Image (tube, rainbow, N blue to C red):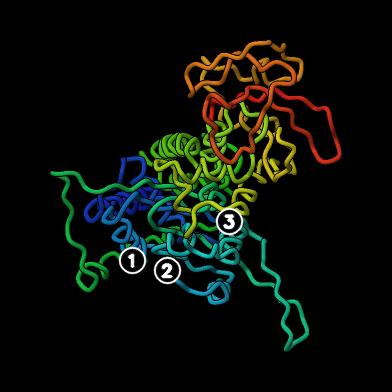
Amino acid sequence: MTDSEPAATTHGEALLDELHAALTRYVVLPSPEATDAVVLWIAASHAQPAWAHAPRLVIRGPAKRCGKSRLVDIIEATCHDPFLTVNSSPSAVYRSITDDPPTMLVDEADTIFGAKADGNEDLRGLLNAGHQRNRPAKRYDAASNQVESIPTFAMAALAGIGAMPDTIEDRAVVLHMRRRAPGETVSPYRHRRDRPHLSQLADQLTQWLRGDMRHLEHAEPTLPVEDRAADTWEPLIIVADHAGGSWPDRAREAARVLLAEADQQDQESLTVRLLTDCRTAIGDHAAVTTRYLLDQLNNDAEAPWHEQGQHGLTASRLARLLGEFGIKSANTRFPDGSQAKGYRRADFLDAWNRYCPPPATEPSQPSQASHPSAQRDSTTHWDDPSRPSDTEPSPGQPTEWDGTTRPNPPSRPSLTSIGTPGTTGTTHRHDQGAA
């Protein structure tokens, strides 16, 4: 250690403390750990050339007036070379990234990636690729007849209502903003009056960190997290270690707390929520038509599916979401002899067990009645129409069901025989009661 390092460390600690005070002056963040994470993220933006990964910062809230845009204002004033965009074209964003990248700030990101947006796959691809160094985009330039390599590496903060795409949040420090409670007060932020002081603080952060770039580039901190989370949090923890004081411990605690919150939120992520809702809709059915499954999902007023576009969740989007888990629709033969596109319960079992296991009181495997070897009973009992029958109709008893509507109990069988195109004789227990 040289004689200059302790003084530099003390200076860094004071700068982070000052930035922390500025944040809490203008914005109420959801927790002390969230505040520390934002402080470190802003500081890390001033040393981007030293990092192997460019962490994203997702600022999301359930509604308007949760402080998202005000936080973006403070970040814009204190981060390195801010590139603020609301609805820039992907080509404009690509051309704005250099070897010493700006800090991308995307406000109202829900208008870009929300359910009613067109997906913006090019921009999402840029944000995903730009999390790691040396992942350039390749474009063919017809004028020069050459393939052009465009850098994508840049730190980025995105603010909006609701969740961002899973692939972006997986590479991000995620903040769940909320409205101020009675008694929580902040100072008003005025751009002309307040920004100059914050910009001076940004210049001091740049001088402090850029003076030790070689040290930052070769730092190998101990991390409390693993895998992609470690990639995201490493620059923040390196900055904290370089500042010293209480910041190293605070950085690691922030990583643990925010990642624990993210893991909890993952249980309610869109794709996991879809698996859980499909399990409820399918129940003990051996198979259901795609139309039936969509009706069950879109008609649930408390689920997000009816908001997935103008007509709710569609068959193509359902197929794309379930395809991430290897679940695909197939032509299915139903008891009345008809065939239709649908989904088989057996194809969901692996994903259900991995991503949304049932409560301990429920069996994790299908019941005996789900298997072809289930015993047949010559009698049929109809009791609670919300539950599947405990027995099966005797051989030859008429069965009619196409999966598109819930039949009335008197005509509801508990045994169905389904097959795939070109096969016969495949019998599955198909309890109709649990829709």
Query: Residue 282 placed where, x, y %?
Result: 58, 32
Q: Which residue is mark 2?
A: 82
Does any portion of residue 3 appear in the rendered image? no
Mark positioned earlier in the residue sequence (2 or 1): 1
Please name the residue shown 73% across and 43% down the image. Answer: 339
Label 2 CA crowd tier, 10 Å (few <14, some 14–19, many 20+): some
Contact (Cβ within 8 Å) of mark 2 with mark 1: yes
The kind of residue tagged 1 is: Ala
Disc on res. 290: none
Q: Quadrant of residue 427?
A: top right
Say above or below: 329 vs 128: above
The answer to whether residue 362 is above or below residue 239 is above
Element under disc 2: strand
**Residue 221 on image: x %, y %:** 54, 41
Quarter of the image for residue 328 reads top right
> Residue 418's image quarter?
top right
Tell me which residue sits at (67%, 42%) in the image.
342
Is residue 5 shown left or right of residue 406?
left
As drawn, is 361 to the left or to the right of 21?
right
Q: Nearer the viewer, residue 126 or 1?
A: 126
CB under 8 Å between discs 3 and 2: no
For this rendering, which residue is in front, 265 or 171?
A: 265
Q: Which residue is mark 1?
A: 77
x 40%, y 58%: residue: 159
Between marks 2 and 1, how big is the CA–CA gap? Answer: 8 Å
- The three-letter code of the residue at mark 3 reads His
Q: Nearer the viewer, residue 380 or 421?
A: 380
> Residue furthest toward the left?
183
The first of marks 3 and 2 along the sequence is: 2
With 151 as the anchor, is 204 left or right in this view? left
Q: What separation in Å lies between label 1 and label 3 (alpha carbons)?
A: 22 Å
For label 3, the residue is: 131
